[in-house]
Amino acid sequence: METRNSQSATRNSRLFGRFCTMETQEQENINPRLIRWEQKKRMWYNIYLFIGVGINFLLYFTKPYGFDPGKSIFWGSFFGLGIPLATIFVLSHLHQKVLNG
């Protein structure tokens, strides 16, 4: 009975060893910079949101020469929300593309 248990234990360890090597090979293929991006994605989204808000401030405070959607509540809210959200989307997409290489 002990031989049967020892045989199954060695077989399980071989199977587990194969599983572990497959797992480590998959982990080696993953870019560590992408892992850090996933861990700190929330921080980057906040930074990109503030960049979008900064773009809005630049557009709104150059009123005589720049962009003024303040005459319409629809366009003001559309651009006020759209520019920061588009900035988040575009910059995070570019960030991931740069990390992928």
Image (cartoon, rainbow, N blue to C red):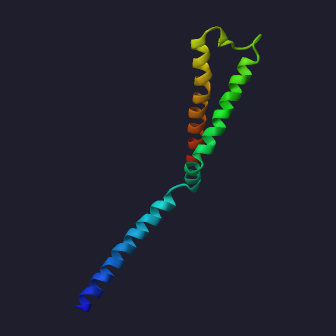
User: 69 above or below 11?
Assistant: above
Residue at 65% of width from left, 8% of height from top? Answer: 71
Residue at 71% of width from left, 19% of height from top? Answer: 59
Residue at 43% of width from left, 64% of height from top? Answer: 23
Foreground of the two, 53 or 9: 53
Foreground of the two, 70 or 67: 70
User: 87 above or below 77?
Assistant: below
Classify residue 55 as left or right of residue 91: right
Q: Would residue 12 be seen by someone viewing this image from the given angle? A: yes
Quarter-of-image position of residue 1: bottom left
Quarter-of-image position of residue 66: top right
State the image coordinates of residue 95 (x, y, percent, origin top left): 60, 41
Q: Would residue 101 be seen by someone viewing this image from the given angle? A: no
State the image coordinates of residue 74 (x, y, percent, origin top left): 57, 13
User: 60 above or below 43?
Assistant: above
State the image coordinates of residue 51 (x, y, percent, origin top left): 68, 32
Residue at 41% of width from left, 66% of height from top? Answer: 22
Foreground of the two, 27 or 59: 59
